[in-house]
Image (tube, rainbow, N blue to C red):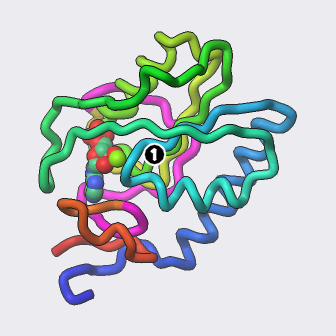
Amino acid sequence: MKNIQVLISKRDINKKVVSLAKKINKDFKNKDIIIISVLTGSVVFCCDIIRNLNINFSLDFIRASSYKGKTSTNKIKLISAENLDIKGKDVLIIEDICDTGQTLAYIKERLLKKKAKSVKICVLINKNIKKMKHIDIDYTGFNIGNDFIVGYGLDYNNKYRGLPYIGILK
Ligand code: IMP
Ligand code: MG
């Protein structure tokens, strides 16, 4: 696409997904975990990850939103986490991107409050910027700079999610 500069190719994403899934398979071997995918951006990544898993897991979704256009609004909305039955369970959050860290910090805190036994985080992209909240990420695909990116689930005003690569929106 003319207004998008490719940053991470489809091939590199696929290779990374396979290696992340391999680590997850190893770390959660013989465990029964709950995978929580953060809607909407992480669905593409999540679908690819789970097709490479050979462990027991159940899958759930939550919705969190802090972005309007290209800017983070600081206010996080979390929808549909109330019915999650995660007490005593090992949870793996799958998220597309960690930017300021607020969304993941907030979600993790909420899940720990609901008495999850453990909460681990897997992100495809981590932006190398100063985090507004401290956050430990257990599985990271790629570290990038502070560009606004789209594709492979990531959007700009709900567009470009279907691109098979990740690109910088110009
Ligand atoms: P955080 O709370 O600032 O870490 O923001 C995380 C959320 O903002 C992600 O789940 C994305 O939905 C969105 N986001 C952050 N950076 C980008 C980007 O470069 N492209 C698209 N969405 C982004
Ligand atoms: Mg998101």
Residue located at (57% from left, 44% from top): 139
Percent from the top left, x then y, of residue 6?
35, 79
Q: Nearer the viewer, residue 170 or 68?
A: 68
User: In the drawing, does residue 104 fall left or right of residue 142?
Assistant: left
Which class describes the residues within 10 Å of circle 1: few (<14), some (14-19), or many (20+)? many
Determine the image quadrant of residue 151. bottom left
User: In the drawing, does residue 124 fall left or right of residue 22?
Assistant: left
Q: Which residues are magenta?
A: 132-153
Kindly give the residue lying farthest to the front in the view shown.
Answer: 83
Percent from the top left, x then y, of residue 28?
77, 36
Task: Based on the picture, tell me whether residue 133 belongs to the magenta stretch.
Answer: yes
The residue under label 1 is: 95
Residue at mark 1: C-beta within 8 A of ligand 1:
yes
Percent from the top left, x then y, of residue 158?
24, 61
Kindly give the residue lying farthest to the right in the view shown.
Answer: 30
Position of the C terminus, as image quadrant, is: bottom left
Determine the image quadrant of residue 95. top left
